[in-house]
Amino acid sequence: MYGSRGVGKTLFSIQFAANMLAKKYTVHLLISNQSRNLKLLCQFYPRIPYKRNLYLYLIDTPRDIIISFTKILKRRRPKSSVIILDETLPMQFFVRRAWSESLTKKLGLIFSLFGKLLEDGNKLLITLPEQDNIPLPRRWPAFIEFSKYFYRLRRKGRLRELFSVKLLNLPSEGQLWNIDPKSIKLETILLARLYPTRFGFSLIEKEEF
């Protein structure tokens, strides 16, 4: 899922975690260790059910992600869990920086562990920031191998709109990957309209649209 800064991706992630816990899933929530995220978590925490099934990981560095992924893989009961990564995958932060040998090794290990998490049958929700000039998530080609479907959270006045997004006009398998992002067509479907509150999003019924 992607959206512009301040649209409510972290609030959505925390509320999604609470909903999955209510369904008695084991949930691993990875969020960046920032004061605004911790404030949201503290506001929502009293409303989270089955807290014993929630594992929280605060992320500052790529090393924190490696440690968190390793801990998740070691907790194999139940095997299938819900894993939520709220803007914590590090590749989005190192796009224009020189990669040292140490950082390159860490990023390679992160994606190796990421692949193992998928192989274990876990359900993943990943949130990403939106590009400034095109309604696509940043570094989206890294995820296209996993799915051609995304979700977009968009601000519309005081409301939020949640869309499913399918990417069209992508190169076929074996074709040269040389495509202008602006030539990609997006097939969008409005799934819900939401009203943000300090305790989460409230669904607006279709009759109120």
Image (spheres, rainbow, N blue to C red):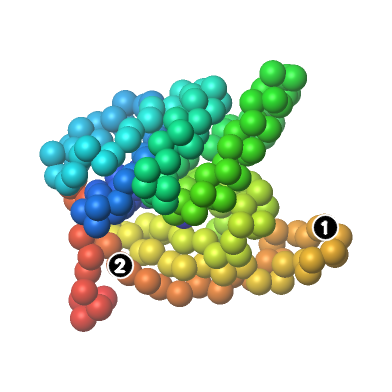
Left or right: residue 25 versus residue 121 is left
Q: Residues within 10 Å of mark 1 (few under 14, many from 20)?
A: few
Residue at the far bottom in the pictured view: 207
Question: Which mark sits nearer the N-terminus, 1 or 2?
Answer: 1
Residue in the foreground of this view, choosing between 36 and 77:
77
Q: Residue at x 58, y 37 (%)?
A: 113
In the displayed structure, 140 sits above or below 111; it is: below
For residue 66, which quarter of the picture?
top right
Secondary structure of the residue carrying numbered label 1: loop
The disc at residue 87 is: none
Residue drawn at (69%, 18%), measured in percent from left and top? 102
Hey, which residue is sitting farthest left in the picture? 46
Q: Which residue is mark 1?
A: 178
The alpha-carbon separation of the residues under discs 1 and 2 comes to 36 Å
Q: Which residue is located at x 67 percent, y 52 percent?
A: 141
Residue 198, x across and y down, in percent: 18, 45
Q: Is residue 36 above or below residue 2?
A: above
The secondary structure type at the circle numbered 2 is strand
The answer, for residue 135, to whether it is visible in the render is: yes
Q: Is residue 132 visible?
A: no
How many numbered markers are drawn? 2
Q: Amino acid at mark 2?
A: Arg
Q: Give the residue drawn at x 21%, y 81%.
A: 207
In this picture, is 163 found above or below 135? below
Q: Quadrant of the C terminus?
A: bottom left
Give the residue type at disc 1.
Asn
Query: Which of 26/64 is in front?
Result: 26
Q: Is residue 139 left or right of residue 32?
A: right
Residue 190: percent from left, percent from top: 40, 73
Mark 2 lies on residue: 193
